[in-house]
Image (spheres, rainbow, N blue to C red):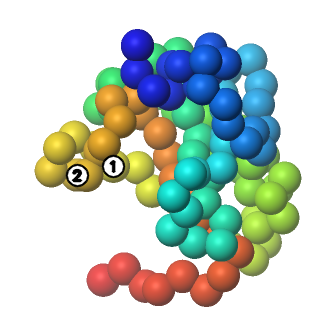
Amino acid sequence: MCIFCKIIEGEIPNKTVLENDNFLAFEDISPQAKIHVLIIPKVHIQSFNEMTPNIMAEMTSFIQEVALTLGVKSDGYRLITNIGQNGGQEVGHVHFHLLAGEQLGSIN
């Protein structure tokens, strides 16, 4: 069982930001910005390459709700997902990083 599945099951504590039946958003333990939240589906999906359009559509609404909950929807935020080894994916469970709360540097 991967670390995110253990978090979903309650085996590993987390600082939950928002949760519903299908998704969980929680604070990253190594934040890269003033606000750094991880957003995951509760069903194990290895990477973005395995995401279905239906799950992605539901996740989109959840991510927007997370941004609203954090109070960053109007100011802006960065959303990142890493895919595979060369893309920097460290945990084999699809997840999105939401970074916000400060002016983020541009990505060129």
Across and down, in percent, residue 34 comes to: 65, 72
Mark 1 or mark 2: which comes first in sequence?
A: 1
Across and down, in percent, residue 82 comes to: 33, 49
Residue 34 at least partly seen: yes
* Alpha carbons under labels 1 and 2: distance apart: 5 Å
Compare residues 108 and 38 and report the one nearer the observer: 38
Residue 42 at least partly seen: no
> Does residue 106 appear left or right of residue 58 in this picture?
left
Question: In which quadrant of the rendered view does residue 92 lie?
Answer: top left
Q: Amino acid at mark 1?
A: Asn
Q: Amino acid at mark 2?
A: Gly
> In the rendered image, which residue does mark 2 sit on?
87
Q: Is residue 77 above or below residue 86?
A: below
> In the rendered image, which residue does mark 1 sit on?
82
Q: Secondary structure at mark 2?
A: loop
Say whether marks 1 and 2 touch (CB < 8 Å). Answer: yes
Q: Quadrant of the N terminus?
A: top left
Q: Residue at x 80, y 58 (%)?
A: 70
Q: Is residue 108 above or below residue 52?
A: below
Q: Quadrant of the C terminus?
A: bottom left
Q: Residue at x 40, y 29 (%)?
A: 93
Task: Report the residue that reaches farthest toward the left.
Answer: 86
Across and down, in percent, residue 69 comes to: 84, 53
> Does residue 81 appear left or right of residue 70 in this picture?
left
Across and down, in percent, residue 5 comes to: 51, 19
Q: Residue at x 60, y 26 (%)?
A: 12
